[in-house]
């Protein structure tokens, strides 16, 4: 009887502990970032799933941590999509190197002033670690830092699946040739994103005015990167997007920062929304499974 009581007490302690964890960290209960709805990749067709095997799956190397809020989404969506395409309990082969964002954010401020030396070193180091670990190709889980993709391919010698390219393919596939680009100030202002879309895919890119760009950038760094999703920020992002669509005739919105889709989604906007996280994940999984 004493032994039964001890076992019962241990079971009660475990159950109470689990309840405390789920209450304190509600995101663990449903695997979703706090304040954001579920975001799912496109469902795999039966034909694709039937002919897909995990035996020869490539290993995806993810440069994450910029920020970890969206890196979690990359990992979750990659595994969900592999399971749907392959079936059973299959999951993605993923190596992730998570950059410490505190110091990285300080270096980003230097980059805004033209000094990219530290950021380039960090990105090259991350890619080198993934290559040494056995990654077959790299995915940079950040629109802004995809600006270093060509550098990584050249210096490290590992292929990078560029978020701009797969997003451009998705947009052209829908017959759209003019879009609004939302993202960090660097992404909205620097030529690496705009020029690649325009020159490689014939897609005209429009961006918000300076005041709105400053606001969007501030929200990304001060709020979204810390899991803070406010009704005011959501309202402003939607208002900025819809105003630009009306003023410029743009036919779609690129959520060109991997944290923005955690704030606004397709249901919030009147034109097609391009969630770069989901698009990037779908392309990475297809490449890993040799579908594309």
Image (cartoon, helix red, strand yellow):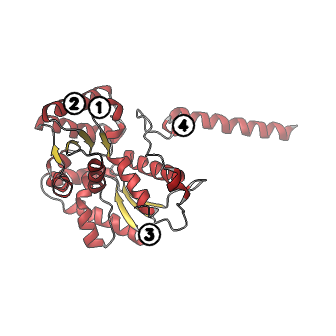
Give 217 or 77, whichever is nearer the viewer. Answer: 77
* Marker disc for residue 133: 3
Tell me, for residue 242, which label it has, or none. 2
Residue 51: % across, % down? 53, 60
Q: Could you tell which of marks 1 and 2 lies nearer the N-terminus? A: 2
Q: Real-space Cα distance between discs 3 and 4?
A: 31 Å
Q: Is residue 78 left or right of residue 190?
A: right
Q: Quadrant of residue 61?
A: bottom left
Q: Secondary structure at mark 4?
A: helix
Q: Earlier in the sequence, mark 3 or mark 4?
A: 4
Quadrant, the N terminus: top right
Tell me what residue is drawn at x 20 percent, y 53 percent: 197
Q: Is disc 1 in contact with disc 2, using a CB cutoff of under 8 Å?
A: yes
Work out how far the residue at label 3 is from the one at label 1, CA to CA, in angstroms.
Answer: 41 Å
Residue 29's label in the rendered image is 4
Query: Where residue 215 sits: x, y (%)?
Result: 19, 35
Q: Look at the image and tell me in which quarter the C terminus lies.
A: bottom left
């Amino acid at each position: 009887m004493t032994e039964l009581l001890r076992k019962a007490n241990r079971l009660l302690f475990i159950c109470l502990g689990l309840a405390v964890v789920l209450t304190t960290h509600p995101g663990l209960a449903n695997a979703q970032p706090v304040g954001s709805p579920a975001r799912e990749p496109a469902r795999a067709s039966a034909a694709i799933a039937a002919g897909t095997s995990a035996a020869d799956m490539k290993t995806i190397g993810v440069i994450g941590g910029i920020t970890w809020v969206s890196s979690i989404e990359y990992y979750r969506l990659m595994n969900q999509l592999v399971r749907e395409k392959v079936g059973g309990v299959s999951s993605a082969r993923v190596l992730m190197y998570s950059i410490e964002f505190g110091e990285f954010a300080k270096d980003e401020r230097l980059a805004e002033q033209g000094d990219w030396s530290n950021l380039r070193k960090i990105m090259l180091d991350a890619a080198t670690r993934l290559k040494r670990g056995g990654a077959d190709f790299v995915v940079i889980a950040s629109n802004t830092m995809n600006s270093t993709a060509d550098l990584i391919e050249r210096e490290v010698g590992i292929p990078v699946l560029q978020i701009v390219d797969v997003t451009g393919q998705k947009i052209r596939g829908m017959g759209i040739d003019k879009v609004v680009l939302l993202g960090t100030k660097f992404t909205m202002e620097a030529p690496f994103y705009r020029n690649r879309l325009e020159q490689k895919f014939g897609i005209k890119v429009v961006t918000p005015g300076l005041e709105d760009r400053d606001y969007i950038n501030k929200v990304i760094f001060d709020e979204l990167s810390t899991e803070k999703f406010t009704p005011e920020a959501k309202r402003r992002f939607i208002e900025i997007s819809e105003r630009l669509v009306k003023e410029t005739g743009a036919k779609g919105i690129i959520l060109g920062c991997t944290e923005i889709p955690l704030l606004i989604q397709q249901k919030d906007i009147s034109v097609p929304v391009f969630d770069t996280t989901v698009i990037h994940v779908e392309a990475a999984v297809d490449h890993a499974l040799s579908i594309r």
